[in-house]
Image (cartoon, grey):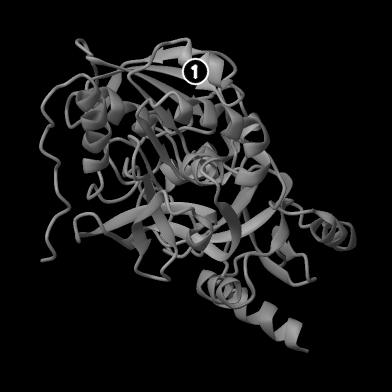
Amino acid sequence: MAETMLTDTIADENVWAEPKPTALLILADGTVIEGRGIGAVGHAVGEVCFNTAMTGYQEILTDPSYAGQIITFTFPHIGNVGTNDEDIETVNMASASGVRGCVIKTDITDPSNYRALKNFDAWLKSRGIVGIAGVDTRALTALIREKGMPNAVIAHAPDGAFDQQAIGKEAAAWPGLVGMDLAKDVTTGQTFRWDETTWVWNKGYGHEENPVHKVVAVDYGIKRNILRLLADAGCDVTVLPATATGEDILAHKPDGVFLSNGPGDPAATGEYAVPAIRDVIAADVPLFGICLGHQMLGIALGGETKKMHQGHHGANHPVQDRTTGKVEITSMNHGFAVDAASLPDSVEETHVSLFDGSNCGLRVKDKPIFSVQYHPEASPGPQDSHYLFTRFVNLMRARKGQEPLPEQPAPEAA
């Protein structure tokens, strides 16, 4: 009885247009959520999370860190500004979209934005993303907050014909993200150089013509806007695959090394990435990591990571920078976190979440090494954390005997 009531709550009966559902979201516990199919026809299995961002759905859906996940958007109007060719975040265009599916409340409308080139539904189809509309995403979010992120299968069949028993078995059998290395599925297949800078209204993207700092970025699922901000900061960026060894990285004689975001379990990817990171640490090269890179850096320094109950996904997460006392609003996307209590005395916790107190940053006390859990590139999200790229540059400048640049501080609260 409880399961039926839950299904009735999550399915929004007031917006039905068809006599029967054309999409299902079947959770591993047997809960069946009905809706209208959008995007690609077929089905996919993954972990269901929720994202609270009100904008930037295209950047979210092309963020490789979402590989293996089905995204529930809590904001009801998704797709209303259409899609374009400029807001894609994945670098490895040869790989399939990392995200497994998306869940939204209201029907997709015709785009209303001067930059739109394609309807959101057509864009989902072109990228092979299965979606479901007509769902009470608030109720689904409440379920995730109470029970944690469930494994599920999302299915879309225009004729409404589903083998619910088989789909339910697939959802229940999927092992989940713990122990899963997904970086190898989204990383670049070859080394390349990056010089594109950030987007400017009425001008588009530019190029860094006079870089001064040689940076190696290890791609565990890196986002384009991270690379653009590194270029903005005067970095000559060389991107290496996730499997790059310490010898591969140091062979480029970098002024600094960047460890990128990415999907999956950091302990699993760390099987091959952590030894490389330790080689860089031993070389005393300035090191900056975010998201998955932050987590694996924590492991390389002797700490541990843990799976979170509901994760952090959104563009409105408050974080305190303990080195300055400032509070910044950040963009986040992670289901694992560094256990601050496991870090050795040589490592300082620099940032904490003001939502739940979880670790959001660290630095090594006697080395030019730091990292943060969140996404300072702000794509999508606020730009409060752009100063971190200057912090990284200043570590490289210090090694060259140069004066530090002023950090752009996080804005004061209004």
Residue 386 position within the rendered picture, expressed as x and y whole percent measured from the top left: 24, 42
The residue depicted at 49 percent of the width and 54 percent of the height is: 343
Residue 371 position within the rendered picture, expressed as x and y whole percent measured from the top left: 39, 43
Quadrant for the N terminus, please.
bottom right
The residue depicted at 16 percent of the width and 21 percent of the height is: 401
Residue 351 position within the rendered picture, expressed as x and y whole percent measured from the top left: 34, 57
Camera-side residue: 403 or 24? 403
Q: Quadrant of residue 336?
A: bottom right
Camera-side residue: 200 or 208? 208
Q: Residue furthest bottom?
A: 1
The residue depicted at 58 percent of the width and 53 percent of the height is: 304
Residue 367 position within the rendered picture, expressed as x and y whole percent measured from the top left: 35, 36
Residue 264 seen in render: no
Quadrant for the C terminus, please.
bottom left
Q: Local crowd at mark 1 within 10 Å, few (<14), some, or many (≥20)? A: many
- 73 left or right of 199? right
The residue depicted at 25 percent of the width and 31 percent of the height is: 395
The residue identified by callout 1 is: 249
Residue 378 seen in render: yes
Above or below, comparing residue 322 to residue 208 in the picture? below
Camera-side residue: 1 or 381? 381
Above or below, comparing residue 207 to residue 297 in the picture? above
All told, the count of numbered labels is 1
> Tag 1's secondary structure?
helix
Q: Quadrant of residue 142?
A: bottom right
**Dot 1 amino acid type:** Ile
Camera-side residue: 37 or 212? 212
- 396 left or right of 272? left
